[in-house]
Image: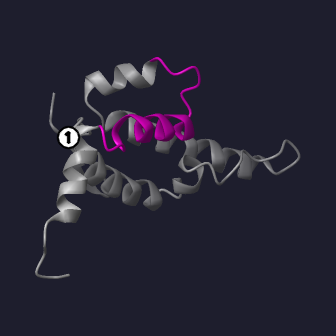
Amino acid sequence: MSSTYTCKHGSTEILTPRNYHTWKADIMVFITCENGLEIVLGNEDPPLANVSCAMRESYKKRLGLATGMVYSSVEPSIRAIINKLPDCNPTQIWIALGEKFNTAASRSGRQQIAKWLTPSPLR
């Protein structure tokens, strides 16, 4: 399996337990390019039944693209975590990945904290 996820908007390393913060920043850009970030973040609800078919289809397409991008851009061990979720919508996946890898106890979280604490000539 490749260690890189590539789409028409660019490429990034697939998500591993060590690179959550970098992966998250990159994949958010890709999902934004497909107008799906608000869906992933849980800020856009599915359209009501009485809206036009075109609006429902647009949402469905963006939902599918966002779900596919997130799922396809993680290593197999992380896909196993996603597959255990009761609802595999991108918002639930996003939350679960954040809870798993965006903590001070996670390897990625510790690396990010160390990076913040390291003096930088740009600060």
Outermost residue toward the bottom in this view: 122
Quadrant occupied by the N terminus: top left
**Compared with residue 28, is residue 116 higher up or lower down, i.e. above or below?**
below
Quick one: 35 or 40, which is closer to the camera? 40
Q: How many marks?
A: 1
Q: Which stretch appears magenta?
A: 84-105
Question: In the image, what residue occupies the spot 32% across and 44% down?
Answer: 104
Question: In the image, what residue occupies the spot 31% across and 56% down?
Answer: 26
Q: Quadrant of residue 70?
A: top left
Could you tell me residue 55's position as x and y percent?
72, 52
123 left or right of 51 in image: left
Could you tell me residue 101's position as x and y percent?
34, 39
Quick one: 43 or 119, which is closer to the camera? 119
**Compared with residue 56, is residue 115 higher up or lower down, i.e. above or below?**
below
For label 1, the SS is loop
Q: Quadrant of residue 81?
A: top left
Residue assigned mark 1: 18
Question: In the image, what residue occupies the spot 81% across and 51% down?
Answer: 52
12 left or right of 26 in image: left
Q: Is residue 65 magenta?
A: no
According to the image, what is the colour scheme of the structure?
one colour
64 left or right of 78 in image: right
Question: In the image, what residue occupies the spot 40% across and 56% down?
Answer: 28
Q: Residues within 10 Å of mark 1 (few under 14, many from 20)?
A: some
Give the amino acid at mark 1.
Arg
